[in-house]
Image (cartoon, grey):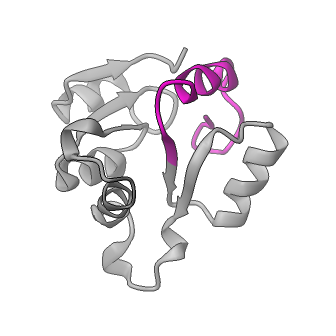
Amino acid sequence: VCSSDLKFITGAKEALENLSKKYKLAVISGAHKKMLLDMIEEGNINYFSDVISSYDFDDLAKRKPAPYAINMLAEKYGLSKNEIISIGDDRTDVEMARSAGVTPIVVLTGNLRHEEAEELRVAHILESIT
């Protein structure tokens, strides 16, 4: 939805709206919860069933890139790992997905360049979310 400096990405709202019609969406971020909720409200993109910030967990071992948040969501919604994908723009997103046993997808709207994403050996690399 947002780039690494938390600005809206062109086409993000439409992509989220379309995805939310078929899938349950969640945010797992290292940003502060208030900032995430403010961005969601400001952008009128309330398509998420859950918004999880690493700051929600006092235990540092549960924060990204640990698999805790993905595992928590899988349990909450009764989903198996093959029913979950993780779309992210940072190395920690890929690490979190892999440690949780879900498929990571990289979108090149944030911290990773194409070459870096290839080095991570992810199956899918998207230039944008649209």
In which quadrant of the rendered image does the N terminus lie?
Answer: top right
Q: Is residue 2 above or below residue 55?
A: above
State left or right for residue 56 relative to residue 47: left
In the rendered structure, the answer to whether residue 120 lies left or right of residue 30 reads left
Residue 53: image location, x then y, percent: 54, 64
At x 65% / y 45%, what residue is drawn?
A: 5
Q: Position of residue 17 (x, y in %)?
A: 64, 25
Q: In the displayed structure, would residue 91 be above or below residue 65?
A: above
Horizontal and vertical percent position of residue 37: 72, 56
Q: Which of 65 and 72 lies nearest the eye of the viewer?
A: 72
Does the magenta portion include 19? yes
Q: Residue at x 26, y 37 (%)?
A: 83
Write the residue at 39% across / 84% down.
Answer: 59
Q: Position of residue 46 (x, y in %)?
A: 71, 42
Total numbered labels placed on residues in the image:
0
Above-or-below relation of 67 to 88 = below
Q: Is residue 27 magenta?
A: no
Examine the image and state in which quarter residue 121 appears: top left
Q: Nearer the viewer, residue 111 or 64?
A: 64
Q: Which residues are magenta?
A: 1-26
